[in-house]
Image (tube, rainbow, N blue to C red):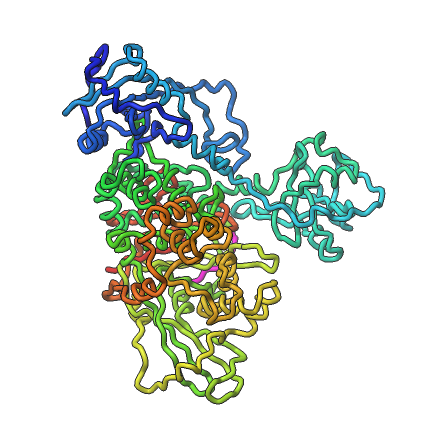
C-alpha cells in the first residue's frame, strides 16, 4: 500500500488547476468504494477520489491509477462508525431479510466523516486537512465531490428500488369478489370453528364471500410438532368455490394474512378493508393476536430444512483468508452469492477472474469498468481470493456485490429486479452472459460444456435419428416410484428419500411419446427419445427438479430427500453414436413436432397455444410436462414462441429481444436486425446499443456473414474418464425457488465449508440430502 504522509498543507505549486473539475449533476462520483476492489471509506486509508475523473481508489490500488494516468490531485475520504446504544431490546423480526428495519440484526449506526486534500508523489501521498485549501477552483472541486450523492446512491435513486425484504405477495385476481349480504357481523374475539363437532379456537379463517369461520390445515411447525387444524375451511371452499379467506387474529393496520384457494398462495387483497367492513370488522382497529403465514415461515427458518442446511445445533468454526470471503446479502441476493461462490472455486473461473482479475480491470479505463459485467465479475472473484475481505476483525469483512448484481442482471426481466430468483436459472444466465465475452472469458465455461447425443426412435419401424445439443446443466427428474419412506427415529416423522443414481438414470432413460404416427409405416404407435453424454467435462452440474407446477400455476417444492454419493461414474451414460444394427430414418421423416400427446393436452388446458406447447416439449426433450411448463414461463417473451416450427425468424446465434426494446432503436433510423444485434452485444441495454450503432456502424456484420461465422465457430469440449467426486452443492430452504434462502457447501481438500452469505465456516454436518444443485468434479 502507499505510504501516507500527513502535512499541514499542500504546496500551491503541487495543485494542477488544469486537471481539476467540478462534478455536475449527472456525473458519477466513485466515493463509496474502490473501483478495483471493495474497500470503502471505512477501510484503512479510506478512498481517494480523483478531482478530474471522480474515480475512486483505495490505498492498495491507487498506484496503478497514478502510474498509468499521471493524476496527482485527490480528495481523501475516511469514515468511522459510532454505534448507537440500544436502550430497548430489538423488536420481533417481521421481515425475511438481514440488515433492514424489521429484519435480522438491524442496528442503525452513526458515521463520522473526515476529508483531506491529497497529492500523489512517486512512492507516497501527502494529505492535509481541507481547511488548508486556499484556491477557489480547488475548493469548488472538493465541495462538489463532498456534496455529490455518490454513484451508489445515484443509481439506487434512478432505479427507484431498494433492497427487497422478502415480504412479496401477488395481487389476487379475486379482489372484486361479490360478497353475500347475509347480515352476518363478526365479533372481534371469541371465534370458534363453525364446523360441527370441531370446536377449534385457533388457526381460524374467515371466508370473505359469506363470512363463514372455519379452521385451516394442520401445518408443520418443527420436527414432530404440527399446528392444530382440521382443514374445514378448505372443505368449505371445495363445496362453495368462494376463493378468498383471511386468517383471524392477523389483521392489523388494514392488512392481514389473506389466502387464495384458486391461486394456491398467500396474496395481497387491495380491498381487504372493505371486505372486512362488510362483516362489521374495522381493519384498522382490531389487534393482531396470531402469527401470519410469513411469521410462521420466519419461525420455521430456525427449524427443519433451515436448521439442517444452516447446521444449527452444531458449533461452526468461522474461517478466514483467501477463498473464504463471504458475500453480504444485499437484499434477496443469496441465490447470487451461492452461485458465484461455487463458480469461484472452479479452476478456470479462479484463474481468469481471480488470479488475473486485476489485469482485466486495469486494462480498461477505470470509469468504464463500472458498467462492464466481466470487470465486475473479476472484481468480485479477485476480492474473494485476495483474503483482504475475510478477516476476523476490522472494517473489511465480506463484500457487497451491488454493481455485479446490476451488470449481470442488466436487461433481464427477472435478474434486474430486487426479487428472489431461482439459483439454477441464474447459473444458466451467468453462463450465457460469459459466452458473449472475449475468447479468454468464454474459455471459463468450457469446463462445464456438455455435448449431448439425442436419439429418436420410431416405435413402429424402429428406425432411428441421432442429433446433438449443448448443455451446461443436467436436469434430473425425481422418480417417486423408486423412493422409499424413511422414518426419523427421534422425531417419528417419515420423509421420502430417493437415490441420486436413480435420478440420473431417470434422466437418461427412454421417454415415451404416445400417439405418434410413424412416418414409415403410417401407423399410430409410440416413439422414444433419449440422451447420452458425448463428453465428460471437468465439471458436471445436476439440478434436482424438486419443484413442480400446480394446476393453479404456482410452484411447489416436493417433500423429498436425495441420497447423494461422494463419488459417481457416468461412463455408462456415454453416447456411442449409431449402432451397426440400427437403420436411420430419412432426414425428412422425423416430424419436429413429435411429442407426448397427453402432456400436450395438459399444456393446452393451461391456456398455451399448441405451437408453444409442442416447442416446449421438444426443447425439453419430452422429459415431462412440468419441465415443459417451466420452459414456457422462461420463454414467455420470446417473439418466436407462437410461430410455427420452421417459420422462426433467424436468430443467427443471437438472443432475440422483444419488440418493445427494438422499436426504441429502430425509431432512430436503424433496421430491426441491427437493433437486435446491438442489443445482443450490449446485454439488452438500449442506450449502449444505440451508442454502438452510432459510433461503430461498421462493426455490425451482415446477417449472412454472421451465419457463416457462427458455423465456423466449432465448440471444443473438455473430455476425460467419467469418474467424478462431489465438489459443491447449493441447498434451498423454503417452498418456492423464488423465495426462501440459498446456501452453498464447497469442498476444499478433505474439508467441507458452508457459505451462508457473509458467514463462512467449517461444515460439521453437510446436508447432502437437501441439495438443489450438485456440482461434481472429474477425478
Confirm whether residue 427 shows in the render. Answer: no
Q: Residue furthest right?
A: 183
Place of residue 741 in the rendered image (x, y in percent of width and height, measured from the top left): 46, 45
Relative placement, left or right, of 778 versus 505 is left
Our reading of the magenta stretch's main secondary structure is strand
Relative placement, left or right, of 236 versus 336 is right
Q: Nearer the viewer, residue 432 or 247?
A: 432
Question: Bounds of the magenta span?
Answer: 492-499
Q: Quadrant of the N terminus?
A: top left
Q: Quadrant of the C terminus?
A: bottom left
Up/down of 156 relative to 512, above or below? above
Question: In the rendered image, which quarter is residue 672 located in?
Answer: bottom left
Relative placement, left or right, of 674 versus 609 is left
Q: Nearer the viewer, residue 200 or 536?
A: 536
| Residue at x-position 66% and y-position 33% | 252
Question: In the rendered image, which quarter is residue 307 located in?
Answer: top left
Place of residue 329 in the rendered image (x, y in percent of width and height, measured from the top left): 41, 38
Place of residue 201 in the rendered image (x, y in percent of width and height, measured from the top left): 71, 41
Q: Nearer the viewer, residue 371 or 543?
A: 371
Confirm whether residue 442 shows in the render. Answer: yes
Amino acid at each position: 500500500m502507499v505510504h501516507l504522509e500527513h502535512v499541514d498543507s499542500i504546496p500551491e505549486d503541487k495543485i494542477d488547476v488544469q486537471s481539476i473539475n467540478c462534478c455536475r449533476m449527472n456525473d458519477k462520483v466513485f466515493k463509496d468504494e474502490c473501483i478495483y476492489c471493495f474497500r470503502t471509506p471505512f477501510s484503512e486509508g479510506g478512498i481517494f477520489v480523483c478531482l478530474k475523473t471522480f474515480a475512486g481508489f483505495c490505498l492498495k490500488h491507487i498506484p496503478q491509477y497514478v502510474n498509468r494516468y499521471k493524476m496527482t490531485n485527490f480528495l481523501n475520504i475516511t469514515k468511522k462508525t459510532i454505534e448507537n446504544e440500544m436502550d430497548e431490546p430489538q423488536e420481533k423480526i417481521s421481515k425475511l431479510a438481514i440488515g433492514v428495519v424489521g429484519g435480522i440484526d438491524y442496528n442503525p449506526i452513526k458515521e463520522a466523516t473526515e476529508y483531506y486534500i491529497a497529492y500523489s508523489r512517486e512512492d507516497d501521498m501527502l494529505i492535509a486537512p481541507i481547511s488548508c485549501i486556499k484556491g477557489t477552483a480547488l475548493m469548488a472541486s472538493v465541495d462538489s465531490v463532498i456534496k455529490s450523492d455518490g454513484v451508489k446512491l445515484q443509481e439506487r435513486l434512478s432505479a427507484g428500488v431498494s433492497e427487497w425484504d422478502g415480504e412479496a405477495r401477488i395481487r389476487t385476481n379475486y379482489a372484486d369478489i361479490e360478497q353475500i349480504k347475509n347480515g352476518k357481523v363478526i365479533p372481534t374475539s371469541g371465534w370458534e370453528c363453525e364446523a360441527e363437532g370441531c370446536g377449534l379456537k385457533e388457526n381460524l379463517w374467515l371466508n370473505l364471500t359469506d363470512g363463514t369461520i372455519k379452521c385451516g390445515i394442520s401445518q408443520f411447525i418443527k420436527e414432530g410438532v404440527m399446528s392444530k387444524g382440521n382443514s374445514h375451511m378448505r372443505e368449505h371452499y371445495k363445496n362453495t368455490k368462494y376463493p378468498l379467506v383471511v386468517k383471524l387474529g392477523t389483521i392489523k393496520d388494514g392488512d392481514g394474512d389473506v389466502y387464495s384457494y384458486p391461486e394456491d398462495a398467500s396474496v395481497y387483497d387491495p380491498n381487504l378493508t372493505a371486505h372486512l367492513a362488510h362483516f362489521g370488522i374495522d381493519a384498522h382497529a382490531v389487534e393482531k393476536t396470531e402469527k401470519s403465514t410469513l411469521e410462521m415461515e420466519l419461525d420455521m427458518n430456525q427449524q427443519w430444512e433451515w436448521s439442517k442446511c444452516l447446521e444449527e445445533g452444531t458449533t461452526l468454526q468461522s474461517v478466514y483468508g483467501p477463498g473464504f470471503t463471504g458475500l453480504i446479502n444485499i437484499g434477496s441476493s443469496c441465490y447470487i452469492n451461492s452461485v458465484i461462490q461455487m463458480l469461484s472455486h472452479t479452476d478456470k473461473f479462479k484463474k481468469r477472474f481471480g488470479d488475473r482479475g486485476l489485469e482485466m480491470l486495469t486494462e480498461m479505463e477505470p470509469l468504464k469498468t463500472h458498467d462492464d459485467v466481466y470487470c465486475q465479475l473479476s472484481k468480485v472473484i479477485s476480492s474473494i481470493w485476495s483474503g483482504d475481505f475475510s478477516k476476523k476483525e476490522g472494517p473489511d469483512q465480506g463484500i457487497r456485490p451491488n454493481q455485479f448484481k446490476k451488470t449481470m442482471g442488466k436487461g433481464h426481466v427477472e435478474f434486474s429486479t430486487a426479487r428472489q430468483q431461482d439459483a439454477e436459472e441464474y447459473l444458466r444466465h451467468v453462463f450465457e452472459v460469459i459466452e458473449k465475452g472475449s475468447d479468454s472469458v468464454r474459455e471459463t465455461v468450457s469446463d462445464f460444456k456438455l455435448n449431448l447425443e439425442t436419439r429418436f426412435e420410431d416405435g413402429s419401424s424402429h428406425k432411428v435419428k441421432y442429433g446433438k445439443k449443448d448443455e451446461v446443466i443436467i436436469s434430473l427428474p425425481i422418480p417417486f416410484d423408486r423412493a422409499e419412506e424413511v422414518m426419523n427415529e427421534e422425531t417419528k416423522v417419515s420423509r421420502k428419500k430417493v437415490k441420486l443414481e436413480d435420478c440420473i438414470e431417470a434422466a437418461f432413460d427412454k421417454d415415451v411419446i404416445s400417439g405418434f404416427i410413424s412416418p414409415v409405416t403410417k401407423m399410430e404407435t409410440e416413439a422414444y427419445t433419449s440422451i447420452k453424454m458425448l463428453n465428460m467435462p471437468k465439471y458436471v452440474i445436476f439440478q434436482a427438479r424438486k419443484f413442480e407446477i400446480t394446476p393453479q400455476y404456482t410452484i411447489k417444492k416436493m417433500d423429498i430427500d436425495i441420497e447423494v454419493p461422494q463419488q459417481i461414474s457416468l461412463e455408462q451414460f456415454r453416447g456411442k453414436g449409431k449402432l451397426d444394427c440400427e437403420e436411420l430414418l430419412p432426414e425428412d421423416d422425423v416430424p419436429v413436432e413429435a411429442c407426448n400427446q397427453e402432456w400436450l393436452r395438459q399444456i393446452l388446458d393451461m391456456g398455451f397455444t399448441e405451437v408453444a406447447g409442442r416447442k416446449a416439449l421438444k426443447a425439453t426433450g419430452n422429459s415431462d410436462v412440468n419441465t415443459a411448463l417451466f420452459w414456457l414461463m422462461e420463454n414467455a417473451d420470446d417473439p418466436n414462441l407462437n410461430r410455427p416450427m420452421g417459420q422462426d425468424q433467424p436468430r443467427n446465434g443471437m438472443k432475440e429481444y422483444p419488440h418493445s426494446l427494438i422499436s426504441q432503436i429502430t425509431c432512430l433510423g436503424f433496421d430491426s436486425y441491427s437493433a437486435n444485434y446491438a442489443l445482443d452485444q450490449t446485454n439488452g441495454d438500449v442506450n449502449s446499443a444505440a451508442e454502438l450503432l452510432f459510433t461503430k456502424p461498421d462493426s455490425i456484420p451482415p446477417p449472412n456473414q454472421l451465419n457463416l461465422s457462427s458455423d465456423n465457430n466449432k465448440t471444443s469440449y473438455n473430455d476425460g474418464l467419467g469418474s467424478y467426486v462431489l465438489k459443491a452443492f447449493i441447498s434451498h430452504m423454503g417452498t418456492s425457488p423464488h423465495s426462501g434462502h440459498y446456501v452453498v457447501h464447497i469442498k476444499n481438500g478433505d474439508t467441507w465449508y458452508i457459505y451462508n452469505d457473509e458467514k463462512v465456516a467449517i461444515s460439521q454436518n453437510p446436508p447432502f440430502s437437501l441439495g438443489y444443485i450438485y456440482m461434481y468434479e472429474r477425478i
